[in-house]
Image: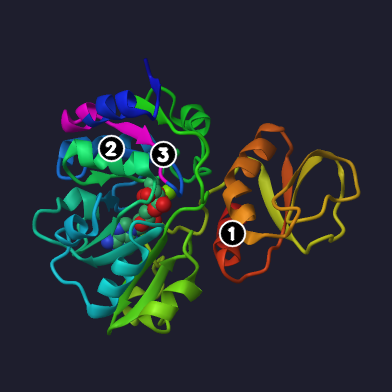
C-alpha cells in the first residue's frame, strides 16, 4: 500500500517509517513535503535521489513546536524570535546559524539551517510521533511544479517515497516565505505563503540581500528556472491580446478570456489573491495536462501574496 489517508493510522505508519530511515510524502498547509529523519544523513540522501535534486540545494527542517525548532539554531536574533512567536506554526521558514546537531547534508555544507513549524495538524502530528525534526523539500521532481494534492505527488514521484499520506488539497498552496537576517534586518530569500508586509510589521523593513550574495541566487535552490510546467509559459497583461487556438492554454486571474483555448483556468473570480495562491499550482498542473504547447498567464497585482504568485510565474516562464 503506497497511499494512505492522513488519519491517525496513516500517521502512525508514516512516523514508524521515518524512524526507520524511510521517506514519506505528507501534506502541510503550503505544499506537500517529502519527509525523512532530519538528523539521519542516509535518510536525507534519499530525498535528493528521489527528487533528482542537486546536493548543493539545502533542505528545510520541520519541527512541531517553536521551542524544539529553536534548538536547531545556535543563535537567534531578537527580531527573529518575534517572528517565531507571531507566525509559528505557519508558512514562515527562518534561515539562521545552525546548531551542531544538524547534519551537513541538510544544509549542503552551509553554516546556516532553514527551519519551520508547519501549521497543518497532520504534519504536526507526524513530526511529534516521529520524535525528531523532519527534513522535507517540496514533494516534486526537481525544477517541476510543486504538489498541492497527493495525486500531484504520485504523478511526479510514483513509487519513490515509501508512503504518500493523502490529506486532500493544501490550504495555502504556495511554499513558505523564507527569511534570513543580516545586520539585524530581515532579508527575503523566497516570497511565499506569508506576505512580506506582515513580516515587516513585526521585524522592521526588509533589507536587500547583502554583497556576499551578489551574483548568486538568493537561496541556493531559488534558481531562475523552477516551478516549471512542461509547456512554455508566457506572462501577459490581464485581458492582453494573444493568439488563441488549440495549441494554447490560458491562466486568467479573475476574468475568462474571450477567445477559444485548449484549456482555461480562472484563479479567483472575486480577484482574491489568497484564493488565487491556493489554486495556482493545481491550475498549472491541469493546464500542463491539457497538452497545450504554450500557457498564457495573466499578471496579478504584485502585493501581498501576489508577490509570491508573480515570483512563481516568472520562474516558470524563464
Ligand atoms: O512550504 C515549504 O517551505 C515546503 C514545505 C514542504 O515545508 N518546503 C519547501 O522546500 O518548499 P524546498 O526544499 O522545495 O525549498 C526550500 C528552499 C530551497 O530553495 C533551499 O535552497 C532554501 O530553501 N534553503 C534551505 N536552506 C537554506 C539555507 N541555509 N540558506 C539559504 N536557503 C536555504
Ligand atoms: Mg521546492
Percent across and percent down for residue 239 are 84, 60
Of callouts 1 and 2, which one flags the residue occurring earlier in the amino acid sequence?
Answer: 2
Residue position marked by numbered label 3 in the rendering? 27
Instruction: Single out the mark in the foreground, 1 or 2.
Output: 2
Q: Quick one: label 3 or label 2, which is nearer the N terminus?
A: 3
State the separation of the CA atoms marked 1 and 3: 20 Å
Dot 2: within a 10 Å radius of its alpha carbon, few (fewer than 14), some, or many (20 or more) residues? many
Q: Which residue is mark 1?
A: 309
Kindly tell me whether mark 2's CB lies below 8 Å from ligand 1. Answer: no
Give the side of residue 273 with respect to residue 201, left or right: right
> For the residue labelled by badge 2, is the local secondary structure a helix, a strand or a loop?
helix
Determine whether the residue tagged by mark 3 lies in a helix, strand or loop: loop
- Residue 209 visible in the shown view: no
- State which image quarter holds ligand 1: bottom left
Mark 1: secondary structure = helix
Residue 280 included in the magenta stretch of the image:
no
Residue 295: x and y in percent read: 72, 47
- Asked if residue 184 shows in the view, the reply is yes
Amino acid at each position: 500500500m503506497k497511499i494512505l489517508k492522513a488519519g491517525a493510522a496513516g500517521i502512525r505508519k508514516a512516523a514508524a517509517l521515518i524512524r526507520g530511515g524511510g521517506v514519506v510524502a505528507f501534506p502541510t498547509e503550503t505544499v506537500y513535503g517529502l519527509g525523512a529523519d532530519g538528523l539521519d544523513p542516509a535518510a536525507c540522501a534519499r530525498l535528493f535521489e528521489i527528487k533528482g535534486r542537486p546536493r548543493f540545494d539545502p533542505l528545510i527542517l520541520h519541527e512541531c513546536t517553536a521551542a524544539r525548532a529553536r534548538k536547531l539554531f545556535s543563535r537567534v536574533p531578537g527580531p527573529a524570535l518575534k517572528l517565531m512567536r507571531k507566525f509559528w506554526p505557519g508558512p514562515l521558514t527562518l534561515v539562521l546559524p545552525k546548531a551542531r546537531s544538524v547534519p551537513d547534508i541538510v544544509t549542503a555544507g552551509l553554516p546556516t539551517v532553514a527551519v519551520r513549524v508547519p501549521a497543518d495538524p497532520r504534519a504536526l502530528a507526524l513530526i511529534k510521533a516521529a520524535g525528531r525534526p523532519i527534513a522535507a523539500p517540496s514533494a516534486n521532481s526537481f525544477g517541476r511544479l510543486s504538489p498541492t494534492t497527493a495525486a500531484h505527488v504520485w504523478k511526479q514521484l510514483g513509487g519513490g517515497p515509501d508512503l504518500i499520506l493523502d490529506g486532500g488539497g493544501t490550504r495555502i498552496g504556495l511554499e513558505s516565505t523564507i527569511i534570513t537576517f543580516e545586520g539585524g534586518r530581515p532579508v527575503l530569500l523566497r516570497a511565499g505563503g506569508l506576505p512580506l508586509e506582515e513580516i515587516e510589521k513585526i521585524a522592521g523593513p526588509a533589507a536587500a540581500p547583502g554583497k556576499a550574495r551578489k551574483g548568486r541566487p538568493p537561496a541556493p535552490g531559488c534558481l531562475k528556472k523552477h516551478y516549471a510546467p512542461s509547456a512554455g509559459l508566457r506572462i501577459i497583461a490581464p485581458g492582453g491580446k494573444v493568439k488563441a487556438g488549440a495549441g494554447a492554454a490560458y491562466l486568467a486571474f479573475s476574468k475568462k478570456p474571450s477567445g477559444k483555448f485548449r484549456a482555461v483556468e480562472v484563479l479567483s473570480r472575486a480577484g482574491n489573491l489568497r484564493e488565487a495562491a491556493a489554486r495556482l499550482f493545481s491550475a498549472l498542473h491541469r493546464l500542463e495536462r491539457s497538452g497545450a504547447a504554450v500557457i498564457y498567464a495573466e499578471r496579478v497585482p504584485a502585493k501581498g501574496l501576489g508577490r509570491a504568485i508573480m515570483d512563481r510565474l516568472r520562474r516558470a516562464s524563464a
